Image (spheres, grey):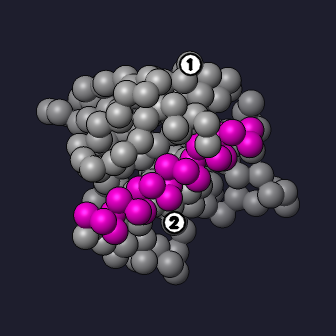
Amino acid sequence: MILAIKKLTFAEYLKYDDGTDTIYELVDGELIPMSLGTGKHGAVAKLLERNFDDQSTKMGNNWTAQRFAVGIRSPRGGRWDTARIPDVVVLPLEQWQSLANREAIIEPNEPPPILVLEVVSESTQSTDYRSKRSEYAVLEIPEYWIVDPLREVITVCTLVEGFYDAVEFRGKEPIISPKFPELDLSAEVVFTA
């Protein structure tokens, strides 16, 4: 659902307040409300956020996973009037701390996050599989997870020469993540969160 008749600039988006608690993504200058999602959607995102934090600590990486807390400014049609808010973003702790006193948006001139993750819902299927996949590749985000409870499949996309190579994981298959090589999870475990 599109709410703005007039297209917003990115600066207008950052200042936008309609007096509700609705969170919006900006896509080609248009406000797109983010739905709350099901309890399963939230549980899956939380489980993965915790696992990424635990693995970061075990690997000795100074990384943090943040759920619904970091936006990423994204190109669409050659313009930068799109901002995505992934379900989970993994980024260096130092980068997260640099967002403390400003809008928590990673700008195009900043290093990309280490990993982004989207949990698919009925209303976001096409966007998560197609639009965001293209946008995140252009931003050179090394790893993009598409976690699809509707199909019970987790697709791990790894950036190779500007494009994502994708591997799907189902059931009890261990999920293989280049950024988290010691991750001990399967799709079955994730979807029973």
Residue at coordinates 35% horizontally, 35% vertically from top-left? 175
Marks 2 and 1, Cα distance to the nearest angstrom? 31 Å
Nearer to me, 64 or 188: 188
Going by the numbered disc 1, the residue's amino acid type is Arg
Question: Is 120 inside the magenta-drawn segment?
Answer: no
Eyeballing the image, is 173 above or below 60?
Answer: above
Q: Residues within 10 Å of mark 1 (few under 14, many from 20)?
A: few
Upstream in sequence: badge 2 or badge 1: 2
Task: Find the magenta span and give its range.
Answer: 38-59
Image spot of residue 148 (x, y percent): 54, 28
Point out which mark residue 151 bears: 1
**Mark 1 residue element:** loop
Question: Is 56 inside the magenta-drawn segment?
Answer: yes
Q: Quadrant of residue 29?
A: top right
Identify the residue position indicated by label 2 in the image: 104
Q: On the picture, is 43 further left or further right than 96?
A: right
Residue at coordinates 66% horizontally, 63% vertically from top-left? 15
Q: Quadrant of residue 56?
A: bottom left
Nearer to me, 81 or 21: 21
Image spot of residue 162 (x, y percent): 20, 33
Going by the numbered disc 2, the residue's amino acid type is Ala
Eyeballing the image, is 22 above or below 171?
Answer: below
Nearer to me, 46 or 91: 46
Q: On the picture, is 170 further left or further right than 5?
A: left
Image spot of residue 18 (x, y percent): 81, 56
Image spot of residue 156 (x, y percent): 35, 33
Q: Quadrant of residue 55?
A: bottom left
Q: Is residue 11 visible?
A: no
Residue at coordinates 29% horizontally, 41% vertically from top-left? 177
